[in-house]
Image (spheres, rainbow, N blue to C red):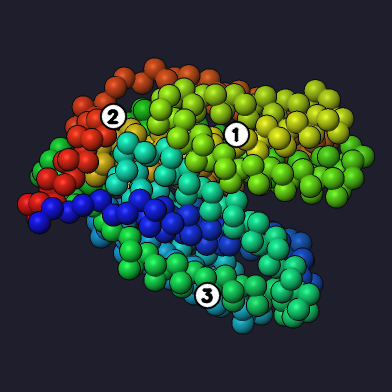
């Protein structure tokens, strides 16, 4: 009996819903829920900031473990464990009031994300190598869809349930997380173990081959730059626009435009990279984001800000999908969970570092122009590194040195499955 690939639509749906839960709900929704949560619990801004930091730290600390677990026990079980962990965190937040308990529960959200997101990207990348950019781009659309849902649902629940609206919001997120976990355990499928390129060792025991590889480190550095520069823009750009005298409602409308555009941008850039070449598309997207960053630096008019949000909308989600796909391209399929978790560690670390550096520049009288000027320089460095990625030799950096063509890899997967 030959193991056939699972239905692409079902697998991508599992991926999209996983990213919706663990990124949009567990990581990004906190900022939307925070005002009513802080008011109800009497938290200071410092305490609220520490809660967000704990989630990010949980992600950073556990992301490598998530990759090793996926390589050793299978991505399907690892993702399900992560989703259930996130659901437990959400459930706890519906009831908790003590600060120490809130810290622990926010940490659970970070841990669950570490065991869910990277293994799901890896699973899609292994099953659909010839459509790798497209399927990862589709998965990334879940973040945009999730934020649209959060933006509409949280205010509605706050209106309906008053001061308990934030608790109900966490509860709804938890229920959705459980449903997605059930879908993953029922419909997601691990590929046959691809051991031909290293039959005497497991991926987990070979992890240092990945961690020390120059090509993997270069891709990881670019992903870290993307993480650091994106989070700075996400946190401070609206404030910069308002400080320059523009209307808050207009700024919100521009942000919504970016979110809507990003839903389609991820899969479109992914499809383009599958046809045109991953590194070509990645460099183009990175340059576009860098140009977008330059616009409000050069001129703070409403047109400059509009163009900034427009260009970001059509490029930033593509940049994310392409660097993720590029990371999976560097190693043989059996190493993808470990490699992708490793590069994600750089991304998560960048997201921790970026706000601290930008905040220090702003408070040190560099202002928003100084902070975004720093962001622009770092993006230039990232664009330069993507040119280095374009010069990578063909073949895997770790594993069998000859990367098979997409159909060949599919045949290899099926052949291994036939002998299981």
Label 3 near label 1: C-beta < 8 Å? no
For the N terminus, give its image quadrant: bottom left
Which circle, 1 or 2, is nearer the viewer?
A: 1
Q: Is residue 341 visible?
A: no
Residue 389 as seen in the image, left or right of residue 295: left
The mark that comes first in sequence, 1 or 2, is: 1
- Say which residue label 1 marks: 315
Residue under the point 52% across and 70% down: 176
Residue under the point 33% across and 33% down: 330
- Say which residue label 2 marks: 397
- Say which residue label 3 marks: 175
- Which element is circle 2 on? loop
Q: Nearer the viewer, residue 354 or 340?
A: 340
* Residue 60 place in picture, x, y as percent: 49, 52
* Residue 145 place in picture, x, y as percent: 59, 55
Q: Residue furthest right?
A: 245
Q: Is residue 244 visible?
A: yes
For the C terminus, give its image quadrant: bottom left
Local packing at callout 3 (Cα closer than 10 Å; few below 14, some 14-19, many 20+) is: some
Residue under the point 60% across and 37% down: 316
- Which element is circle 1 on? helix
Q: Residue furthest left?
A: 419
Residue 201 as seen in the image, left or right of residue 258: left
The mark that comes first in sequence, 1 or 3, is: 3
Residue 95 as seen in the image, left or right of residue 217: right
Q: Nearer the viewer, residue 137 or 328?
A: 137
Quadrant in the rendering for residue 78: bottom left
Distance (Cα) linking label 1 and label 2: 27 Å
Work out whether 287 lies above or below 135. above
């Amino acid at each position: 009996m030959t193991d056939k690939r699972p239905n692409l639509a079902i697998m991508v749906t599992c991926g999209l819903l996983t990213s919706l839960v663990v990124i949009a709900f567990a990581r990004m929704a906190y900022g939307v829920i925070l005002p009513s949560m802080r008011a109800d619990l009497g938290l200071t801004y410092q305490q609220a900031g520490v809660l967000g930091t704990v989630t990010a730290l949980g992600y950073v600390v556990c992301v490598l473990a998530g990759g090793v677990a996926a390589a050793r026990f299978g991505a399907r079980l690892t993702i399900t464990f992560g989703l259930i962990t996130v659901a437990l965190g959400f459930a706890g937040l519906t009831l908790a009031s003590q600060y120490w308990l809130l810290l622990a529960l926010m940490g659970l959200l970070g841990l669950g994300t570490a065991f869910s997101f990277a293994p799901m990207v890896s699973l899609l990348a292994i099953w659909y190598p010839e459509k790798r950019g497209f399927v990862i781009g589709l998965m990334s659309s879940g973040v945009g869809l999730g934020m649209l849902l959060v933006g509409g649902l949280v205010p509605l629940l706050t209106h309906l349930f008053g001061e308990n609206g934030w608790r109900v919001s966490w509860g709804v997120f938890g229920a959705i997380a459980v449903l997605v976990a059930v879908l993953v355990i029922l419909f997601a499928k691990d590929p046959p173990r691809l051991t031909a390129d290293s039959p005497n060792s497991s991926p987990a025991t070979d992890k240092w081959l990945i961690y020390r590889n120059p090509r993997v480190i270069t891709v990881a550095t670019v992903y870290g730059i993307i993480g650091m520069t994106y989070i700075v823009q996400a946190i401070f750009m609206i404030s910069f626009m308002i400080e320059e005298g523009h209307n808050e409602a207009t700024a919100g409308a521009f942000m919504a435009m970016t979110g809507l555009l990003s839903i389609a941008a991820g899969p479109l850039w992914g499809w383009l990279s599958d046809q045109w070449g991953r590194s070509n598309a990645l460099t183009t997207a990175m340059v576009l984001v860098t140009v977008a960053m330059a616009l409000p630096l050069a001129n703070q008019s409403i047109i400059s800000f509009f163009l900034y949000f427009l260009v970001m909308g059509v490029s930033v989600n593509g940049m994310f999908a392409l660097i993720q796909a590029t990371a999976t391209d560097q190693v043989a399929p059996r190493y993808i969970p470990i490699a992708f978790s490793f590069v994600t560690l750089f991304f998560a670390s960048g997201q921790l570092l970026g706000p601290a550096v930008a905040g220090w520049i702003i408070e040190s009288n560099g202002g928003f122009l100084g902070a975004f000027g720093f962001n622009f320089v770092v993006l230039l460095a990232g664009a330069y590194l993507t040119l280095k990625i374009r010069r990578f030799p063909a073949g895997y950096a770790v594993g069998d040195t000859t990367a098979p063509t997409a159909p060949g890899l599919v045949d290899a997967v099926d052949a291994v499955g036939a002998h299981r």
